[in-house]
Amino acid sequence: MTSLAERSQIITLVQEAMNSGALQDRACTVINFNARTLQRWQVDQ
C-alpha cells in the first residue's frame, strides 16, 4: 500500500512532467506506474 506522502510525490512528479509537455500516460510509463491508479488518486484528493 502506498502512503499519502508517496501518493503526493508521485502526483507531483507526473504533474511536473506534464507541465513540461509530457503526456500523462508516457510520464506514468517512465516511472513504471499505472495511469489509471493516478487518476483514481487525483479524484480522491
Image (spheres, rainbow, N blue to C red):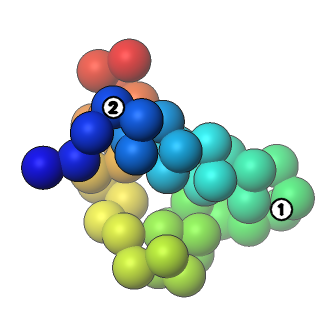
Residue sitting at the far right? 20
- Residue 6 is drawn in which quadrant? top left
Question: Which residue: 49% across, 51% down?
Answer: 10
Q: Amino acid at mark 2?
A: Leu
Q: Mark 1 or mark 2: which comes first in sequence?
A: 2
In the image, residue 18 lies at what x, y percent? 73, 54
In the image, residue 27 lies at what x, y percent? 59, 69
Tell me the residue that label 1 is attached to.
21
Q: Secondary structure at mark 1?
A: loop
Residue contact at pointers 1 and 2, CB within 8 angstroms = no
Tell me the residue that label 2 is attached to.
4
- Front residue of 18/1: it is 1
- Please rate how many residues cluster around mark 2, counting C-alpha atoms within 10 Å: few if below 14, some from 14 to 19, many from 20: few
- Front residue of 9/21: it is 9
In the rendered image, which quarter contains the C terminus?
Answer: top left
In the image, residue 4 lies at what x, y percent? 33, 31
Residue 15 appears left or right of 33: right
